[in-house]
Image: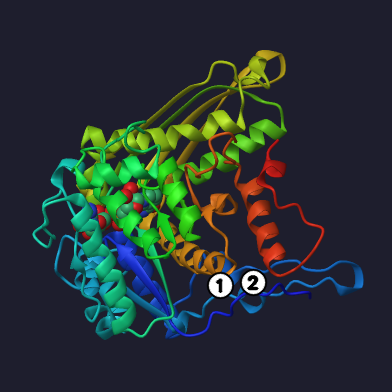
Amino acid sequence: MNMKKIDKPEGKLGILVVGIHGAVSTTFIAGTLLARKGLGQPIGSITQLSTIKLGEGASARTPKIKDVLPIAKLDDIVFGGWDIYEESAYDGAIYAKVLEKDMVDGVKDELKAIKPFKAVFDNEYCKNLHGPWTKTAPTKWDLMLQIKEDIANFKKANNLDRVVVIWSASTEVYIPRDKNVHESLADFQKAMKENSPKVSPSMLYAYAAIDSEVPFINGAPALTIDFPAMWQLAEEKCVPIMGKDYKTGQTLMKTVLAPMFHTRMLGLDGWFSTNILGNRDGLVLDDPASFKTKEVSKLSVIGTILRKDEHPELWGDIFHKVRINYYPPRNDNKEGWDNIDIFGWMGRKMQIKVDFLCRDSILAAPLLLDLTLLMDLAKRCNFKGVQSWLSFYFKSPMHPDEKNPVHDLFAQNIMLRNKMREIMGETGYVNDYDEAEY
Ligand SMILES: NC(=O)c1ccc[n+]([C@@H]2O[C@H](COP(=O)([O-])OP(=O)(O)OC[C@H]3O[C@@H](n4cnc5c(N)ncnc54)[C@H](O)[C@@H]3O)[C@@H](O)[C@H]2O)c1
């Protein structure tokens, strides 16, 4: 294999999680620590379990990805992060009740040692949460500088070689792109110094990370890094960035079923999706302003797979609706229902019903592991800016303004694997994600 020259993952990798007390974060961290102790399996993680086909003809082989791709080893990871609650990641995992206490206790000491930094938090951007463990400063710019200090201190205190920051904190209220704030880096810096309401806490974490030359991932649907000022900063600092909104339950199903309708040339009249969810994420999304952010992310999926301009007779008038209902008895055990109205031969109508009793954080946790390892790899490959090859992991994948996002899970899988092959110096694979479109 003709391996490109990439810095090896030597030394320790720090993973800083924003929202480290949360259900997704603690399930990810506890699971990773359990897996490295041999006390659990990292099921759902492509980097840990999947194989990849390399070579052709007589030299064809299918090794495990983790054995051939130069990603960090689980043993070399050190966790840290921020939250509005002071308690440790252990307390967060027990509160979340995603993994049973007996299981979490297998890594109790390690989790108890993970104490959050004070958060940059503003109730205006997340109405249903109130937490005491927060930073104060006269301007948003100063708050951003405090986050930079946390990153530098974490790196030094743990003797780390590299750091990745991942946002797994609550969904912020909907903020559309503003041409006076988000278009240029100079305007955005000015807006931070002037405490503009168009600058949310997640943007401050992102700016601090990128300015520290640290890759940043956005697991929630908010604007955060999806605007030109951040892209410019990422280019200038040579930092990879990617988001947004982990693709877990209902959207995962959508990006599997919609390509099937496309492949079989079936028509679609409507798609109604509703959920019940009772964890803290559900509580936050009960606020209409935070739900709006999630709704925009969830609605973006179908129209790019089933394009009305391509086949108006099949997909010209699709009614798509998404609802999330906060229902505490279910906690993290979400139930998602889909009613899909399709039509076939001679316009005859049919229905599909999906009832997915999923476990939100169980589906999300392996995505955080893969994303942090792959973004660390991207940084060592000197990739910068938006990493569309990681679209596989997101509901609303970031992409250049002039291009369409790729939502089809199988097209995304090809993009992901072809980029891995390119990194390993394999030739003959198409890596431009345009090629993965229909
Ligand atoms: N679970 C899934 O399947 C899934 C899928 C896609 C996206 N997400 C997104 O992932 C995020 C986390 O989900 P969750 O279920 O773990 O929620 P959660 O409420 O359990 O955890 C979020 C954590 O973020 C903390 N927080 C909020 N604002 C913060 C800030 N400014 N700084 C630091 N910490 C902050 C909260 O205190 C909380 O501990 C949400 O935005 C959710 O929408 C989850």
Which residue: 65% across, 48% down? 410
The single residue placed furthest to the left in the displayed view is: 132
The amino acid at mark 1 is: Gln
What SS does tag 2 mark? helix
Q: Residue 31 placed where, x, y %?
A: 39, 73
Residue 371: numbered disc: none
For residue 378, side relative to residue 415 (left or right):
left
Label 1 near ligand 1 (CB < 8 Å): no
Query: Which x, y percent locates residue 385?
Result: 51, 53
* Disc sitting over residue 65 in the figure: 2
Image quarter (top left, top right, bottom left or bottom right) of the N terminus: bottom right
- Residue 96 makes an appearance in the image: no
Give the residue displayed 38% in from the left and 67% down from the top.
Answer: 28
| 299 w.r.t. 383: above or below | above
Residue for point 61% across, 20% down: 308
Residue located 27% across and 60% down the image = 19
Residue 195, horizontal then vertical, whole percent: 18, 43
Q: Is residue 436 shown above or below 26?
A: above
Quarter the C terminus occupies: top right
Judged left or right of residue 16, residue 283 is: left
Question: Residue 370 or 403: which is nearer the viewer?
Answer: 403
Rendering quarter of residue 283? top left
Q: Amino acid at mark 2?
A: Ile
Specify few, some or many for label 2: CA neighbours under 10 Å numbering under 14, 14-19, or 20 or more.
Answer: many
Q: How is the image coloured?
A: rainbow
Nearest to N terminus: mark 2 or mark 1: 1
Is mark 2 in CB contact (under 8 Å) with mark 1?
yes
Q: Can you tell me which quadrant of the image ligand 1 is in?
A: bottom left
Label 2 CB less than 8 angstroms from ligand 1: no
Q: Position of residue 216 (x, y in %)?
A: 41, 59
The residue singled out by tag 1 in the image is 48
